[in-house]
Structures are given as structure tokens and as C-alpha cells.
Amino acid sequence: MPASPRGAAREALLWTLAAALLTAAMLHVRDRIGEAHVALGYLLVVLGASARGGRRVGMGLAVLAFLAFNYLFLRPYYTLEVRNPLDWLVLLAFLAAGAVAAQLLHRAQREAAHARRRADEIDQLATLGAEALKAARAEDAVVTIAGVIRTALAVDRCDIYLRDDATARLRLMARSTSADGAVDDRSGTSTDTAGAGDGSSAIGSVDGLRRDWRARGRRWNPRTDAVAGVRSTGSADGASRRATAAWDEARIGEISAEMVDGVSAPLIDHSAVETVDTADNRQTAISVDGFSADDVSIPETALSSAEFLRGTDSRSWLMALRVKDEPVGVLRLETAGGLMLDARQRRFAEALAYYAALGLERVRLTEAAGHAEALREADRLKDALLASVSHDLRTPLTTIKALAHELAAGGDERAHVVEAEADRLNRFVADLLDLARLNAGALPIRPEPAAAEDVLGAALQQAAAVWPARTVDASVQPGELLVGRFDFVHTLHVITNLIENAVKYSPDDTSVEVAVHSEAGRIVFTVADRGPGLAPHEREHVFRPFHRGDGQQGPGSGIGLALARRLAEAQDGEVRYEPRPGGGSRFTLSLPAIPPDELARLSS
Amino acid sequence: MEPDLILVIDDEPQVRRAVRNALAGDGVRVVEAATGEAGIDAAAAERPALVVLDLGLPDLSGIQVCAELRKWCSAPIVVLSARHADHEKVQLLDAGADDYVTKPFSPAELRARVRAQLRRARAQAPDGAQALAFGGLAVDVARRRVERGGQAIHLTPTEWDLLRAFVRHRGRTLTHGQLFRAVWNRSDGDPQQYLRVHVANLRRKIEMDSLRPALIVTEPGVGYRFEGGGA
């Protein structure tokens, strides 16, 4: 088929002229050639017209050629009378030749068009992909993508919102608007170069400051920005027109689906034009940050929906942007006349949206990376500070304890409190330092064969020194020596922290019970008290640093249990809480045991 | 009796003061030095009965001072060290120090340790000549016999070697390495890993309550100490 009606008319004129020239030439030698030669000549013209001009031109030429043949070359001359019925076969042959040639042409053209559209489509998506990667700053990429989507889908406005994990709010990352109507783009007239209608702006950013790209005179230009570096040759009409042409091609959706396979944009399979029940839109709207005056509200369903949704007004469409099934933001499209998307258009839009999702993910990752770097630096400073504090505290603490001792010798009972508090401060600093070193991976852990009763005995010895007033009952499973593989010093630290916790949270007149037994290839230490126990919601929280119990006012380092668990885990151990039958808490520390037979073999 | 002279080597005046006050009234005289060099000079000049040595000196490391003193001075050395310095403590004990006290220390603890070391130094008697009694435990080193309440206790060869090392160095903190060398007569090897297990087994045989040992005391991260100073 001809590319346009005008092209068809030109072809018809051309081939009619050719037929006329042929007629004149053959008329000149009419007596010397046979009718068959004449018919052959006309057949060639009909074939040519069909192949170049399409079926209608071919059919027209066929009829015209038959009339000329009949009138000028078939006896009696200059009549349209057909004496021999077989002569009708000539007309039939002309028509058949025309039809077949036109059909062949049509198929070739369709395949060419299809291939071109595929190329256009891939170019378009590649452009978006390149844009998403090329921009130096992640936010710039999102702005560019918004511009590409707006022109590619021929909408008036394209907004991209980032979902902020911390605040659970949407942040406007990019807004692309067109003043003179993107519909013009569909007709093939490029409006991008005029500079009047295209503007892409980033509004939200890392620091929350609004940046307006239009104010800085920056515009996305598909010719210079998007196409450069992606295509070295090809039509310079810009991505918008190629994309618009692609609207007509049903296979585009399939291509898009292949490209986004398993990653992102939700694919839908509606065959008709979208009809959304707008009842959903009465739901609560998500808070949106970073807006200028023309505020819009976005329903919460926009983040979770797998499909395009109508916006709160009839002119806008919303779609969740996802990466690995996690919503990262929302794409909002707006067109004055209302946007009608059929199934394949929506598939194309979703493929484009995938790149917007990737762009947002990049912003998110960039922000997270910056955050992590800041945290690492803070950790380093914290560790250095702790080490310094820990070291510098020892001398004054020694002095304090010495002074307290002198006061106690003078009969002042309060001195004992001073000494005990100095010790507590020292233990707290030691805990902090250990935790910091664990976090920095700088605490050496050396598991070695050791006897359970050795470490438990050392813990009892320390407890007796630190809390002489408290009774600590201890028991060991009778029978074989229990031997485990653990770091002696860190395990002792875990047990004394558990005992300290028990002492702190149980009445002074109750005893703390420690015990050790073997269980399924593990050495299990238990520290039990008759304190209030832990409410179910607190049972995991107590292992977090600086957790404090409900309404608790008393002293407490807040990291003793956190450190205990971390120290245990660092040597293949476990610290758990369980309510104690009859009231109170029971903490268990389990560590790998060395079986008696292996022990006998190795230590002999 | 002439008071024992104690040399305190520490760069922090407050700590020196704390040590002096802790030991005052014990019939001792205290000499102070602020640097390692000054401490070594003072030890040479004064011939102290005991040295209290801080680990964090500005000029010399504790190990250097300890090694230098041990060349010509047999007085007990008690080290003042920080927590998180188990490795340093072990090095110091291996270099010839006799005991350590962790900062911030309580004056009572320091005093007890210093007294024990002075007593031990004074009672340096030839080992192995006589049967020794520690609480209810009787140890006859020469005859390789151990009894409690008249009942003979059977020890494995390894346990006996351990006990002999403990008894010989009673009152001193022995590092894992020192004990290993005493028992296996070499400096490293796999059995070292099981030293703790042998000690635990020995305890079960000679202690009244192996969970609350009265004789073999654990020094976490460093080694063990045999509390037999009173024998």
C-alpha cells in the first residue's frame, strides 16, 4: 500500500502516463504485432502499477488497460464490443495480476513497518534505559525519564513520586509539563525544539529543597539528550514520534513484556479501553511532600494497585512503580482531554513506567548509600570515643575508689555506695566498648575447649565480689565433666551480665539461681530470678541496646543483655529468654558442647 | 622489723597516691617513680621488697621494665593493668611478673595481693622437701602422694604434673603457657587446648566444691593461681 493518499495519486498518474505512452507506441506498430504482445505489454504496466501504487491503483490501471486494449487493439477497432468471449480472459488476467502484485507489496510493506516499529520501540526503551543510567545524579535521571514518558505517551503532564520509606509519604521527584499540548506530537510535528512547551522539573530531592529545572533553563530534548549515545543513525524526529507510531503496533506490549520480565511493571491484560470504578478513590489519600501550589491528592490504593488507576480527577491516571515487587513510587499522568488507554497502550506505558521505577530505585539506593556512609563514619567516631572514654575513665575511677576506701575506713558507710557505683560505671563502659568492638568486627573471639563448671565458677566468684549481699545458688549437672567449645572470657562476660540483670530486676531477698546442663549437643547455662518477668512484647526488646523496661526508673546499663546475646552469637551460641515457672525470668545461654568420647580421645 | 620497701612505678600521680594510701599502715614504706627509667634506677638504688608496675608508662613498655628488672632483681612484681589487656597481662606474667591487679582496682584487693606476694617472697622455702598441707589437702611432692582426710587421691600423670607446678608456684598467677610448659615441657601443641579440661578434672579430685574452688582459682583470660600461700 502507498504510504499516503497523495503518494497513491502520484503513482496512479505516473502509471496512467506509462500506459498511455505504451498505447501510443503499440498503436504505431499495431499491424505488425499480435494481440497477445499487446496484452503482455499492458500486463507489465498493470503489474508495475499494482506493485508501486497498491491494489486500488492496480485495479484502476487493469480496467483502463483492458478498455484501451479492447478499443484500440481488438477487432473491430474503435469499438468496445467483445466478439470472442475468451477475450474477457484478458481482463481477468489483468485484474488477477494486479491483485496478486498488490497483495505481495502489501505484505512486504507490513513486514517492513513492523520491523521498523520494533526498532523504534526498542530504541525508545533503550533511550529510557540509557537516560536512567547516564545522568550523573540519580535525581536528574528521574527528571529526564519523566520528560521521555510525557512525550512518548503524549500527555500534558507526567509526575513521578518517590515513596519515602522513613516517613511513608510520597515525594515529588520530577514533573514534566507541556504547555502547547503533547497531542501535537502524535501528528509528527516535533514541538521539542521550539522550546515553548517542554519543561521537566525535579521538585523533591535528598535535602528536600525544591529544584526547578525549568527555571534553570534546562530542557529535555530527545534529539540532543536522549538519542545521542544511543543511536548513531536513524530518524531524527525524536523519540516521541517513534513512540507514537508504535502505539498502533500490538506487538509492542509483548516486546515490553519481554524486556521487563520478572522485574517490575505490573502487566495487565485488558482488551478494552479502561473503565475504572472510581469508588476506590474516595479512600484516604497519601500525604505528598514537595508540592508547589497546584496540589493533587493521591489515593493510597495507588501504591498497592497492580494496574492503572484513575486519579482523583478524571484527567489523571496513576500507576504504582515497582522494583522486585516492592512499590517504590507512583507515576501520575495527566491530559486535559482525559487519557484513554487501550490494553496495548497500557502495556507500553507500563514498560516505560518500569524505567521510571528503576530511576526511583536508583535515587533510593543513592540516598541509602549516603546514609550508610554517614552511619559508618558515626560508628567509627563512636568507637574511637568509647575507647578514649574507657581508657581515660580508669584513672579517675581508681582515684574515686581509693578515696571511697579511705572514707569507709573513717566509718562513712556511704563510701561503699561510691565504690559500688564506680564499679558499675566501669562495667558499663566495658560493655559499651565490647559492643562497639563487636560492631566494628574488632573483638577477637577464640573458642577453645573449656569446662562449663570452670566458667560458671569464675562467674560466681565475680558475682560474690560485686554483689556480696545477694545469694547466688549454683548447680551443675551431676556426672561427666561438661566441656564445650567457647571463648572463656566472653562467655564469662555473658554469664555475669545475665546474673547482673537478674540481681538488678529481682527483690534483694530472693536468690538468683544459676545452673548448667547438657542438652542435645549443647551446653546450656541458665540464670533464673524471681523478679517480675517480662511481658510478651518485651521478650525480644530486652536484647536491644538501651532498652528499658515498662516504666522502669531504676539503674540499668541497657546494653548488658544486648551485649550478652551478641557475644553468644559471635561464638555459635544463643541467649534466650523464657518465663520461669512460678514467676520470674529465666535466661539461657547455649553453646556448642564437645561430646565426652571425642574429649576422651583428644585429651588423653 | 624494718618496714618493707615498695616501689611504685606509675606516671599518674593520682594512681601513685591511691597505691600509697592503700598500702599505708601495713608497715611498708613506699618509693615512687613516674617513668620506667626512673623506676629501674630506683629499684637498683633502693632494692625494694616488691614492685608495683603500671603498664601504660610513657617511656618504656611494661614488658621492657619487667624484663630489665628480672635480670638482677627477684622481688615480686605486681602489675597494674587495664581490662581488655589480657594479652598484655599474659606477656607480663611470662616476662617474670608475679601477679596483676586490674584498674580500677579496689585498695583492699591491691593490699591483699601485695601482702600475699610479700609473704610468699619471705617464705621462699626449698620445694619438694616436705609434705605440704593446704586446708584439708596434704601434698607430698617427693613421694607423689595426695591425700584428703587420710584418703589417698589418685591423679593421672598429667594432673600430678599440673598440681606439682601449682604447688611449686603457689600464690603466683601462672599463665596457660607457663602451665603448659611445666606439664608438657614444650611451648605449644594441641594438648594446650585441653589444659582447662585437665585443670577442671584436677579440681574435681582435690577441691571440696569444684564450682567454688578454694585452691585453684581461675584468672579469666590469663591462667590459674594456686591459693596456697599460707602453707
Image (cartoon, coloured by chain):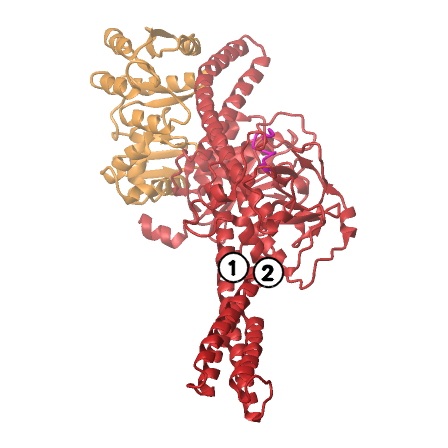
Chain colours: A red, B orange
Q: What is the magenta segment's predominant secondary structure?
A: loop
Query: What amino acid is labelled 1 in the image?
Result: Arg
Q: Which residues are magenta?
A: A199-211
Q: Is residue A208 magenta?
A: yes
Per the image, the residue denoted by label 2 is A248
* Residue B9 to residue A310: above or below: above
Disc 2: CA contacts within 10 A as few (<14), some (14-19) or many (>=20): few
Q: Is residue A508 left or right of residue A442?
A: right
Q: Is residue A469 magenta?
A: no
* Residue A499 to residue B230: above or below: below
Between the C-alphas of marks 2 and 1, the distance is 9 Å
Q: Is residue A594 left or right of residue A539?
A: left
Per the image, the residue denoted by label 1 is A117
Image position, residue A286 (x, y; %): 71, 41
Q: Camera-side residue: B198 or A228? A: A228
For residue A56, which quarter of the picture?
bottom right
Image position, residue B178 (x, y; %): 28, 32
Image position, residue B91 (x, y; %): 30, 27
